[in-house]
Image (cartoon, rainbow, N blue to C red):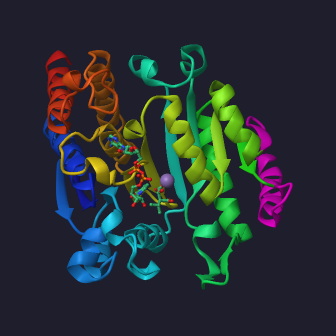
Amino acid sequence: MEKKVAVLPGDGIGPEVTEAAVKVLEVIAKRFGHTFHFEHASIGGDAIDQHQNPLPDETIAICEASDAVLLGAVGGPKWDQNPQALRPEKGLLAIRKHFDLFANLRPVKAVPSLLHTSPLKEENAKEVDMLIVRELTGGLYFGEPSHHTDEGAVDTLLYTRAEIERIVEKSFEFAQLRKGKIASVDKANVLESSKLWRKIVDEKKVAYPDVEVEHMLVDSTSMKLITNPAAFDVILTENMFGDILSDEASVITGSLGVLPSASMRADSFGLYEPVHGSAPEIAGKGIANPAATILSAAMMLRYSFGMEAEAVAIEKAVDTVFEDGSFTADLADSAQQALTTQEWTEKVINEIESQSVSN
Ligand code: NAD
Ligand code: IPM
Ligand code: MN
């Protein structure tokens, strides 16, 4: 197959981790006989510096001409004092909105060889296998009015029925492919948007009798994520709650550096990015963990290109490298044992190449 991938490295460690993922995709192309065309474009602070715009038209055009987008991360102290329209994060929100990427999939699965890095007791973390389905183009992030003065500020939490319906349906479809259990997370004891959310979940569940649904409040969910994380299968939630709960869930299994994500719309086009940010304090040092971005590339192969065997090849290689005890600094026991981003990526590449010999 021939596919076009737009690569948006962004800021901080973004360029380092996307470069690693592109290398892995190139090896996959070679092994499985595909051709991937990579076209790079700017987003975030990088785009502000070059074009005074966190999401330039040229970047949108390159993404529109592609089958999928691979993104690193945006943001950093350099741009933190900028007005809202010239903040790197604005570029990320704008690209999600422009392409209507309403369904953000964030899988969190325990990896046996990483359990020692979890702050949780091993017996609590080892069975964890959940999928956070986060609504990505509505809610507080996009509602108008949204502004502030020194005297007051307003953000608007707005959800339409159609916006809720489509993310709820997505979560039921994923639950059917998994253990058939949804925890729909809201704040229905306070928020009007959550009351509508609950109503729509209840309406939709009639069409999926094989799926079990539990409504849960976000505050107690954040507690249960730590006390009994293995109880969750699919977590369905709105934009802001999903942002917070997914960073919380990342520590269950080890590091933010290993969590991938896919942002999808109704067709196969998608944007793939690590859950983590630009980690400015370690940027440029060559020590970032590229696993989250490499695993996001695997999600791209699976969801946008229908390449299941290719996705599994990457995921297996990453698992094997972890099992061998090879870690970047965020997971290694000591600085001496830590591999650089490039060294760790080479291990994954060698592993994929040796799979092809044994197959
Ligand atoms: P962060 O995710 O960048 O970093 C949180 C912590 O995790 C830091 O200690 C960092 O060093 C570590 N970390 C993150 N990714 C890592 C990796 N791959 N390897 C090793 N360690 C890693 O979050 P933050 O510090 O709150 O935010 C920094 C900037 O990133 C901000 O400007 C924020 O807006 C932006 N951000 C962007 C995205 C995105 O582009 N999707 C996501 C979150 C935050
Ligand atoms: C994420 C990030 C973004 C979000 C920020 C950088 C706008 O935290 O992808 O999780 O809040 O969605
Ligand atoms: Mn986040």
Which of the two residues, 195 or 177, is positioned nearer the viewer here? 195
Which of the two residues, 166 or 317, is positioned nearer the viewer here? 317
The residue drawn where x is 21% and y is 29% is: 348
Which of the two residues, 339 or 30, is positioned nearer the viewer here? 339
Query: Does 215 lie within the magenta span?
Result: yes
Left-right relation of 213 to 104: right
What is the number of callouts on the image?
Answer: 0
- Is any part of residue 177 visible from this angle? yes
Identify the residue at the far right of this view: 189
- List x then y, in percent, for residue 69: 32, 59
Quadrant of the drawing holding the C terminus: top left
Left-right relation of 354 to 63: left
Q: Quadrant of residue 71?
A: bottom left
- List x then y, in percent, for residue 134: 58, 52
The residue drawn where x is 32% and y is 16% is: 323
- Is any part of residue 43 visible from this angle? no
- List x then y, in percent, for residue 325: 28, 17
Left-right relation of 248 to 98: right
Magenta stretch in the rendered image: 188-216
The residue drawn where x is 52% and y is 25% is: 119
- List x then y, in percent, for residue 321: 26, 22
Query: Does 1 lie within the magenta span?
Result: no
Which of the two residues, 337 or 221, is positioned nearer the viewer here? 337
Identify the residue at the far front of this view: 150
Q: Quadrant of residue 309?
A: top left
Q: Is residue 35 above or below residue 145?
A: above
Q: Is residue 59 above or below residue 196?
A: below
The residue drawn where x is 70% and y is 33% is: 224
